[in-house]
Image: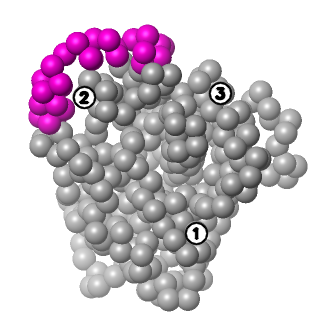
Amino acid sequence: MGNQPINSLRDIGLQLDRDQYPRVYNGGIVKPGDAAIADSIPGEDTNHVYQRQRRPKTRPWERTAGWQGSTSQSGTTGRSGAASETPPFFGSSLRALYEAELEAVRTAYPNMAIWDRAEGLWLLTESAVLPGLGKKATFLTALPFSSRLMPRSWAFWTTPISWQWIGPRHTNFPDGSICAFDPVDRTWSPGESITQLIDLYTLWAFRHEHLRVFGRWPGRQSVPLAYERLDELQDDEYCGCNKSPKLYKDCCKTEDLSRPRAATFWEFFHHMRGYISRTPPEPIYNVIRTRCEPPPIIEILTRPHYQP
């Protein structure tokens, strides 16, 4: 990675620390926000990250020969197997809403792969994140046709010859899915823009690359449990306790260290229902490794899933 992506990482990270959110452009490229809009590339459309975003812990797959499953000219695969009735709480209203947006999503994230199922959509998208980065963030997202269920997505750094799960920071237990925002903040809700959802995932991936390069998570984050703060947070990161405006070293670190380590662990253990590690399910890995079709959405949505 050359100086340009490193400089972009640093500059956008500083903006995030000041609660100035960047914009995500077509192709999943993250650029500085309003303060540097004059630097945008002429003719490029932007996909705006939600301005009401509170604590974000934060596009195209190039299909190759060997991708399993037939795809129509629209790029949407048909439902696999025998046509089955939609499960009771999966409705047609969200189906119509999401399917009406797919062309707009494809414009933002070209070469998107789609699997249309009775209970929802699987989307495979890819984000460049930064020009010159040398890898892309690939997202496999289950988008259920239900207002009761949040989407679940997994992210991998990919190149033409390699892949690597993006985590474990700010992923859910135990399935390693993306935790890009706190649902209670209503950063994104079922029925809202798919493009903006993937933009949020793209910003989350950007923050992971910032963490890898500079050793710290840029901007606000939600880390409510002492054990996780002690295990993951650096002194110069925002604390993560109840939207704290302070750095960890100036906020909860002293109190966290004063508590018995065993007590903080058991608090964490019970909160996570006994799950203390996280990794994507094997069927998710298989999609990335072998280019096979995703598993049934209902199979994935019924797996244990706890947000830290």
Question: Dot 2, how many residues are within 10 Å of its Cα: few (below 14), some (14-19), or many (20+)?
Answer: many
Q: Position of residue 260 (x, y in %)?
A: 15, 19
What amino acid is at disc 3? Leu
Q: Position of residue 223 (x, y in %)?
A: 35, 28
Measured Cα–Cα span from mark 3 to mark 1:
28 Å
Residue receiving disc 1: 159
Examine the rendered structure and indicate whether residue 27 appears above or below residue 240.
Answer: below
Picture residue at 24% right of the left edge, 72% below the top:
85
Picture residue at 55% right of the left edge, 31% below the top:
218
Q: Is residue 52 visible?
A: no
Residue receiving disc 3: 14
Direction from residue 93 to residue 111 in the image, left or right:
right
Start-end of magenta stretch = 245-271
Q: Looking at the rendering, in which quadrant would you find the C terminus?
A: top left
Examine the rendered structure and indicate whether residue 231 appears above or below residue 69.
Answer: above
Question: Dot 1, how many residues are within 10 Å of its Cα: few (below 14), some (14-19), or many (20+)?
Answer: few
What amino acid is at disc 2? Tyr
Main SS of residues in magenta: helix
Circles 3 and 1 in contact, beta carbons < 8 Å: no
Q: Looking at the rendering, in which quadrant would you find the N terminus?
A: bottom right
Measured Cα–Cα span from mark 2 to mark 1:
34 Å
Direction from residue 268 to residue 68 in the image, left or right:
right
Examine the rendered structure and indicate whether residue 75 appears above or below residue 168.
Answer: below
Residue receiving disc 2: 227
What amino acid is at disc 1? Thr
Q: Secondary structure at mark 2?
A: helix
Measured Cα–Cα span from mark 2 to mark 3:
27 Å
Q: Which mark sits nearer the N-terminus, 3 or 1?
A: 3
